[in-house]
Amino acid sequence: MTPRTRAVAWAAVPVRWVRVGVPVAFLVAFFVYPVATILGRGLWPDGHLDLSPLGDVVGDAALRDIAWFTVWQAALSTVLALAVGLPGAFVLARYRFRGRALVRALIVVPFVLPTIVVASAFLALGVEPSLGAILLAHVFFNYAVVVRIVGGLWAHLDPHQEEAARVLGASRVRAFAGVTLPALRPAILAAASITFLFTFTSFGVILVLGGPTRSTLETEIYRQTAQLLDLRTAAALSILQLVAVVVLLIAAGRFQGRRDVALGLRATSDTARPVRSLGDRALLGANLTLMLALLGVPMAVLLARSFATANGPSFGFYRALGELRSGSVLFVPPVDAIANSLLFAVVATTIALVVGGLAAFAVVRHRRGRALEAALALPLGISAVTVGFGFLIALDEGPLDLRTSWIIVPIAHALIAIPFVVWLIAPILRSIDPHLREAAAVLGAPPRRVWREVDLPIVGRAFAIAAGFAFAISLGEFGATLFIARPERPTLPVVIYRLLGQPGAQNFGAAMAASTILMALTVIAILTAERVRVGDIGTF
Amino acid sequence: MRRRVLSILGCVLLGCTLGSSALAAAPAGATVPGGRDPSDVTLTLVTHDSFAISKSVLRAFTLETGISVRVLPSGDAGAALNQVILTKDAPLGDLLFGVDNTFLSRALDEKVFDRYRSPELALVAPEFQIDTTHHATPIDHGDVCINDDKAWFAERKVPVPRTIDDLTKPAYKGRLVVENPATSSPGLAFLLATIDRYGEDGWRAYWERLRANDVKVVSGWEQAYNGEFSAGEGGGDRPLVVSYASSPPAAVYYSNPRPKTSPIGTVLDTCFRQIEYVGILHGTEHPREARRLVDFMLSRRFQEDVPLQMFVFPVRDDARLPAVFTRFADIPTDPATLPPDAIGSHREQWIDEWTDTVLR
């Protein structure tokens, strides 16, 4: 028995079962089973297996091109997001400056905005549909993923380690490459994997900003399933997607290696430093300027449009939000749409934190944990229309007959949010120095107290960041739910889509007003999550 | 402490929504006028995301019959139909509204509808009653047409194009934006208009000429209208767009203040007629109630509500149009049409050929 496993021996057997069992059951019920059912419709049409569609798809040059484009545009988007996001992660993790919390919250806003709204802002700024527009939009949407996930760990790294290396004669670059980079590796890999999977399955961006000639596996699966009802081809394409995602996740797992580095994590208040030197100022200034140009300007366009009524600047469009179609059966007053959005977000976040939190502990403490970690990431890489239609035809019996229940919407959101929770929390759990837990145990602390005093303060912040993402994913109605029937409770993004479906300045303006409300809600939600106090230790 | 505040806030919000939906559901069956048996049936109407009808109209149906209606929006028209087809064995609802003539043959081939011939059809023109087997009942129609930016043409003293052929003239080079028929329903309708007009052998040549005339293709109506169209809200630079004959009244209705004339017009020669149908889903447990809802959807009350809710036209002869439609809408007298069977069997092939002609 290694010291590590001994230190966690307090975890009684039933707890172990819960840790593994709950995430596995959730994944099987709401992902594996629905997806297998819809793939089965395509590949077992008359009760016997027919794999010929796979051959047809692989043999089709046009589809091969689509698959190849899907992979390389995602890879390129990921590299760009990392290149732009890593310096941002550094400055937000290491510098203490006025307004830092607000900037951290603002960068998450793009994440929740409906693609169609962002695209209209981009078009207004002169960005024409093209490959460049796709990449720009992918960086716009995923900047927060890199900054928050990498920055979340960076803020806990002890700066003294890098300083020690420098005192021992290492150059600045060498000290960074030899000390900080290896320590950040799990977080960088997590951010890169999530960005890759998001851009690999990107739908609206490709359709709206890619122009009519570009398609990806995701848009093609949508066309085959939702338009042509060719389930054979759709199933073959989905399997292709699945294979690519599994290969990526295995590669990421390999790259991460089995070595767990104990990092001696510190509270963020000990690691951040004020902006002093000219270099500090230049670095911070450059990053803030970039954020302003990349994220701030498109957001400002939406904000400005929401007030630009025919009679000059006014709240007219905000009032219109409550008046247009108010007699219509599917109308919801804006306050109710906000309440619906918040309700879904709270439920989705709760599910994601419970399932993902349990999974994170399982991932760290079980031999096959990495397999569970990878399996839970699969929903990010599988077509939303496959999952959505899978729900429809699989979840139609007994207690799982949730097809027309509102709960299916937050469940779909949670499916996307769980990998965030696992990937944010597991690396930090792994890197907690086991000696801390041992020391506490030796000093007579009961297991629960070890958890509360040692693990929780360090994991707490990661939980808060994960909760912020889960909340944002749900507020922004990520793709998966576009294809789920959703009675009664329209959310803000649904309201926005409906408004944009009709001509007229009032509709467009009201959609911009709803988008602005969505942006404000996001900022408030993230700021709140940041301030959640963990235990008695204080803010992290 | 802060957490407790948060959870209280959460409860309040939860309570709000539950409360408001309970209120919305309250009239169902509860207040049936004396004499009738209150039936506790709730019908589920599966439909597309653009469905809209006045609350008061549905409430009138409930008051009259005791039957409640739950609306279940399920994606765009194609996605909603495909969902219904895939769940044939365990139906999602009792009726499907929103199958149009471009998808009708798929719905009929897949046998998702039960047969029903509403007596109200007597007041519906035969041109809308395409399904002679009476599985799908027409409810509304709309015309996909080219809209023009009146001010743009007036300022430049360029005549507005009058025919579909005019669009290929040098005067309109770089002026038209259309939607990709592979991803957009109006995009497909305009392609079908050209196929009806130029025939199986001629439509590709027409599109080659349009392409040479620098037609712009975008993936959906929102990008075309609000992104590229010069009279749309996004400040685009193309004065011609594939949209609807109902767009001119909609542009007036959804402006504040309302203009005296519509800023946009309709090129009547370019229109394709879309007809939307409702059908009773095979396997429903409430066939009788579902038939009553079909009858109601053909009643004057429902038909006269349709224009300002969905910006489409009623199929019933005696349904009166609202003033904004009679004043600002131009309705084509002889729009293009194609038999649903032909659309169903050629849809994919036409789209592929169009893609080869226009995008490759």
Image: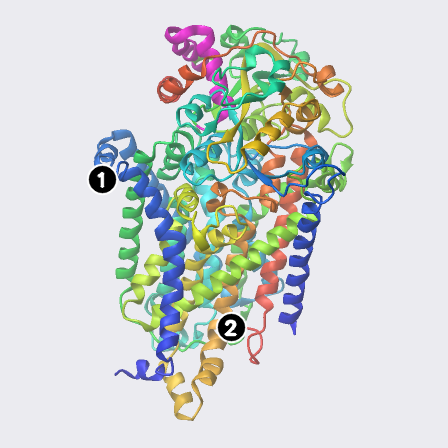
Q: Quadrant of the N terminus of chain B?
A: bottom right
Q: Is residue A470 magenta?
A: no
| Residue A218 image point, x, y percent | 38, 39
Q: Using the image, determine if residue A278 lies above or below residue A261.
A: above
Does the magenta portion include B189? Answer: yes
Q: What span is colored magenta in the figure?
A: B183-211
Closer-to-camera residue (B310/A72):
B310
Q: CA distance from mark 1 to mark 2?
A: 58 Å
Residue found at x 52% / y 60%: A349
Q: Nearer the viewer, residue A252 or A100?
A: A252
For residue A290, side relative to residue A53 (left or right): right
- SS of the residue under disc 1: loop
Report the residue at 57% width, 16% height from top.
Answer: B146
* Residue A158 relative to residue B19: left or right: left
Residue receiving disc 2: A268
Q: Main secondary structure of the magenta part?
A: helix
Circle 1: residue type: His
Residue A482, placed above or below residue A445: above
x, y percent for residue B80: 48, 34
The answer to whether residue A175 of the structure is visible from this angle is no
Chain on which label 1 sits: A
Image height check: is B37 above or below B134?
A: below
- Kind of residue indicated by mark 2: Thr
Image quadrant in which you'd find residue B45: top right
Mark 1 or 2 closer to N-term? 1
Q: Position of residue A446 (x, y in %)?
A: 44, 88
Which residue bears the numbered disc 1? Answer: A48
